[in-house]
Image: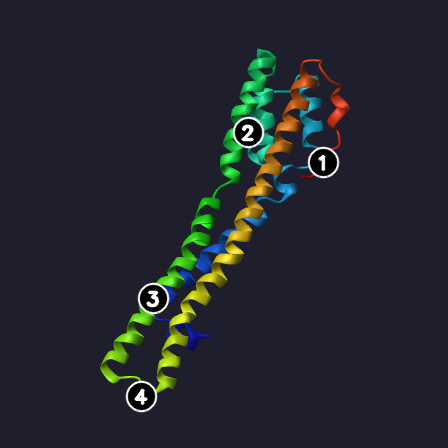
Amino acid sequence: MLGVMQSGGWLMVPILLCSVAALAIGIERGWTLHSARVLPKGLLADAQRWVRDGVGEAPRLGELAAGSPLGQVLAAGMANARRGRSLMKEAMTDAIAAVSHDLERYLTSLGIIASISPLLGLLGTVVGMIQVFSALMLDGAGRPETLAGGISEALITTAAGLTVAIPSLMLHRFFLRRVDDLVVELERQATHLVDATHGDGPPSASGQLGNS
């Protein structure tokens, strides 16, 4: 592996760094975007019970908001539950927007890695080919094996760039879709809390939380 990296030249360094960054982002987002961490089961039922019982103290809401993205949305709604349906819904909409931004963290960087990795590989190939043809101008084409070896080394960076870009692009699309699904579920559960609080739906309608 070290020999392959050395053969690819100095442009293998940023390609390797991109691969490490993509792997780290993939692990971190996979952990963070797990349904159980974003949408804890039973949390909406607890929030509905607290609203029904008139429990809305600041310490309880702060603990709820710090526990999970869903808790952050529900806490925003509970804090504004007595201000009317429209203000409660507006507060939860703002909270969902903030949570959505947090859920998309690092995904832009992952998309950039997926875009620039093949370009870095292509740049490495172009630089390598320039060196090959420069050597041909100086030494001639008397040794075909030397020419073939130089071209082979020049193509290493393209292969490396594509190797990083393809899984990075797949992860980027997967996590974007995952975030969309989670946001839809957050909106659904927020709507249930608003309806249950202001009498437009039974409090038990969403007692069972579905994982997206």
| Picture disc at residue 69 | none
Residue with the mark numbered 1: 210
Q: Nearer the viewer, residue 92 or 153?
A: 153
Mark 3 surroundings: few (<14), some (14-19) or many (≥20) residues within 10 A:
some
- Mark 3 vs mark 4: in front: 4
Which circle marks residue 96 in the picture?
Answer: 2
Tell me if residue 65 comes above or below residue 160 in the rendering. Answer: above
Q: Could you say whether the residue bearing mark 2 is in a helix, strand or loop?
A: helix
Q: Is residue 12 left or right of residue 139?
A: right
Label 4 vs label 2: CA separation? Answer: 68 Å
The part of the image, by quadrant, that contains residue 207 is top right
> Is residue 155 or residue 31 the one in the foreground?
155
What's the residue type where badge 3 is placed?
Answer: Val
Tag shown at residue 142: 4
**Mark closest to the chain's N terminus, 2 or 3:** 2
Cα gap from disc 3 to disc 4, whole angstroms:
23 Å
Q: Earlier in the sequence, mark 1 or mark 3?
A: 3
What is the quadrant of residue 73 in the picture?
top right
Whether the residues at callouts 1 and 3 have beta carbons within 8 Å, the answer is no
Residue type, numbered disc 2: Ile
